[in-house]
Image (cartoon, grey):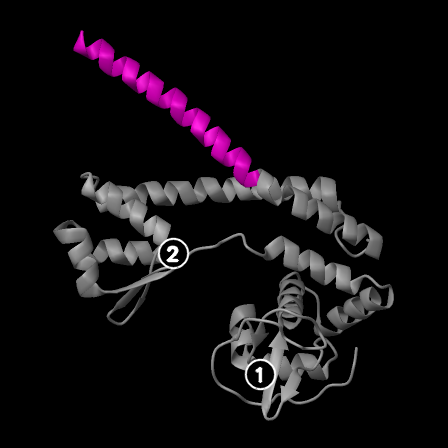
Amino acid sequence: MGSQVGDASGDGAGVGGASGDGAGVGGRYRREDVARAAGVKVRNLRYYQERGLLPPPRREGRIAWYSDDHLTRLRLISDLLGRGYTVNGIAELLSAWEDGGGLSQLLGLEREMTRDWVQEEPVTLTRAALRELFGPTATAADTRRAAALGYVTVDGDLVTYPSRRLLEATLALVRQGVPLAEILDAGEFVQAQAAALADRFVGLFRRHVIGVEGLEPLSATQLQHVTAAVKALRPVAGEVVATEFARAMARRVDAEVAELLRTEQ
């Protein structure tokens, strides 16, 4: 899988734009940034390179640049490790896929399956600004619970909302008099239902598109087919959920209006 070279150190954020990296095109990342994005330790990059799991980065002077393909492969390695594969087993698996011409299709499938599910604009506020937004009804306990649910992260005096849309929706409800604690109750319920829906759709795809034996027996052509299916089906889950929720809300609101009209007679 190519010779290995050592990492060059470098600080700073990943840079968007064309990479020029022989491993692919797209985003460019310094060592720390690609490790952070992949959820692995920086020291693992050199280890994976030494074991033949990861191609070397492109070097420009003393800086090592990693590409989107490096990031994709790191995520794939982490997934395989999480499913019980050993490092040697992963090396053999990647080598077999590469020899069979299917590795590029496999990496393309991983990119297609994981990209762009969440497109959110984060918002960071000081605790003082947060209190000004929500008023006296918001408590420290509410903030701790919001953090536990993943709606905010707290770093000293700074509170970050990963989703501006969810922040704005929460504020709209609070300003209409809904207690924040009850909004968090609803949020926890929605998270559980969303997780169940995700499990259902992923299960359908796994059984009927990929197949019960997983990716290992698939040829390069079959992997291309699965990737095309992912691309076609990605928007379907969101459209189904949005349509069914709208239909359910229409039925529920109609029933509520009818009940209100009856009580007024």
Identify the residue under disc 1: 43
Q: Is residue 137 left or right of residue 111?
A: left
Q: Amino acid at mark 2?
A: Gly
Quadrant placement of the N terminus: bottom right
Query: Residue at position x 56%, y 76% from top?
Result: 29
Furthest residue to the top? 265
Residue 163 in the image: state x and y as whole percent.
Answer: 38, 55
Image quadrant where residue 7 sits: bottom right
Q: CA distance from mark 1 to mark 2?
A: 28 Å
Residue 160 in the image: state x and y as whole percent.
Answer: 32, 63
- Element on which disc 2 rests: loop
Give 18 or 182, whichever is nearer the viewer: 18
Q: Could you tell me if residue 258 is visible in this image?
A: yes
Query: Within the magenta stretch, is there residue 254?
Result: yes
- Element on which disc 1 rests: helix
Query: Residue at position x 84%, y 67% from top?
Result: 96
Furthest residue to the front? 18
Q: Is residue 25 left or right of residue 176?
A: right
Q: Which mark is residue 97?
A: none
Give 3 or 144, whichever is nearer the viewer: 3
Query: Within the magenta stretch, is there residue 106?
Result: no
Q: Could you tell me if residue 219 is visible in this image?
A: no
Identify the residue under disc 2: 150
Q: Tell me where the magenta segment starts and ends, as one range.
A: 237-265
Query: Residue at position x 37%, y 60% from top?
Result: 122
Q: Amino acid at mark 1?
A: Arg
Residue 241 in the image: state x and y as whole percent.
Answer: 51, 35
Q: Is residue 140 above or below residue 203?
A: below
